[in-house]
Image (cartoon, helix red, strand yellow):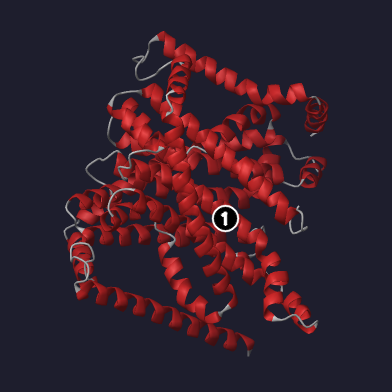
Amino acid sequence: MTTVRAWSERSSSLRRGALTLIIAAALYDALARSGYFPQALTPTLGAIASTLFASLADGTMLLHAAATLYRVLIGFGFAVAIGLPLGVLMGRFRPVENFVLPLMSALMPIPSLAWVPVFILWFGLGNTVSVLIVFYAALFPMLLNTWSGVRAVNPIWLRAASAMGANEHALFWKVIIPGASPFIIAGLRQSFLRSWIAVIGAEMLAGSDWGLGWVIFDAKEFLDADVMLASLIVIGLIGFATERLVFGSIERATIYRWGMARSAQV
Amino acid sequence: MHDVVENFAAAGVRDSHPFWRAWRNIYPFIVVGALWEAIAHLGIFPIQFFPPLESIAAAFARLCASGVLPHHAFDTLIRLTAGFALAACVGIAAGVLMGRSRRAEDILLPLVSIGAPIPGLAYAPLFLLWFGPGNISTVALVAFVSAFPVIYNSWTGVKAVKEIWLRSAQAMGADDRRLFRHVVLPGALPYIVTGLRLGLAQAWRILVAVEMLAAVPWGLGWLIFGAQEFLNTDVMLAGIAVIALIGLGLEKLVFQPLENFTVVRWGMMT
């Protein structure tokens, strides 16, 4: 009974949500068609859709998206490969924590994009700069979350496991890593979000020939608002998809299954 | 296990002495600084690209003395304040409204959840196109981007106020205004403060980048970006140091006191 009511409430919420979006889209389209603003600045929805489909059909949009994803994945991969072990070391060994923590708190408040001009000078225009900016942006959330996760592992679990004769290796893989996993996964999620933001900015500033950020910024020169909005849609969709599909399924496969967090919290 | 306990005990003794605490925070910087100096003076990289610390400090002092750096920093802070204040007002109002009224939630939530996952900077060229380069698009973009976490957290906070508090307050005869002022707002406050904090951090990250794109005449982002043209790496690094200091100051001087003053004091959070 209650589930039926909850379901109907939810579906009516969905319906009203869709209605809002349709009304908002219709309002925008009416504004665009009214000719109150120049057509180049506020293209109609039809123009945006046809630009989007044309660029998807001839593959340019896919290549741009691939270039952006490639940069994100390399930078994010390096950040995880360094941030995760370093965070665990910080959580386990006091001297490492004492050394890294002050440096981290000094570097963290610097927005990653502030480094773009410096990196351009050091490494030249191109992929290296974007990848490094992504790395810088993704590193700190990963480090911080892993470190807090390892520290948050209940000491009683550690004592119980050692009392039952677990060696250092078993302690690490069976107790510390599962115990810290909610934090680590939250860190992965935050890191990816930061990388996704950073890569767009890096591509705009360190313009290479490919990439979604570069397309948007390049379109400004030609007043192609339809290209900009079409790329914006693609950026939003990719971000949304990775957030929901990739990280959502990682969470389901690990921490909910291990009972580390309730799914109601999502 | 034993050594971990001992380690903590030993650290506890050393923690108590202020000298040790200060030294612990400073020595990593000395190590990294020495490494930097060594690399800079060895001449592996051209000195113009990899200046030693003393020339960064000299650039910093020179720019401070001539008043250029304070002017840049001041303009950046004004934009940050303007954009963030706008975001805070609109964001809290929209979030609370969404939490209290079903209709507002139905209207606003789809728009917010579509806008939020797009990186703020992706909107930058669009804003530049619509509002023209300069202060208006910078402030508008900062406000737009930092409003999302504020809206989202205020909404969650109002929703998280326990039903039973509302009912007992109503049973004790609280009218709508007092219900809002004495129950909903304090109950939602930890979330709202978190939202403001996230929003400010996001505003700060976006602002520096937008200043590079928006061709504003003053601002720290522009200082760094402009220095690139002249290969003034020392000026760039001095600018980044100021950005780090401001970022650190925002966290330590604005948010921690605000949190202590409200949330911790009311016992909503320890």
| Residue type for callout 1 | Leu
| For residue A144, side relative to residue B63 (left or right) | right
Q: State which quarter of the image contains the C terminus of chain A.
A: bottom right
Residue A175 against residue A21 in the figure, above or below: above
Q: Looking at this view, is B117 or A106 the one in front?
A: A106
Q: Looking at this view, is B214 or A12 the one in front?
A: B214
Residue that extends furthest to the front in the rendered view of this protein: B66
Where residue A22 sits: x, y (%)? Answer: 35, 79
User: Would you call the spot at circle 1 few (<14 residues within 10 Å), some (14-19), or many (20 or more)?
Assistant: many
Q: Quadrant of residue B16?
A: top right
| For residue A106, side relative to residue A74 (left or right) | right
Return the residue at label 1. B196
Residue B22 against residue B113 in the figure, above or below: above
Q: Chain of mark 1?
A: B
Q: Residue at x 47, y 62 (%)?
A: A244
Q: State which quarter of the image contains the N terminus of chain A.
A: bottom right
Where residue B262 sits: x, y (%)? Answer: 71, 55
Element type at marker 1?
A: helix
Q: Looking at this view, is B149 or B91 the one in front?
A: B91
Residue B34 against residue A7 in the figure, above or below: above
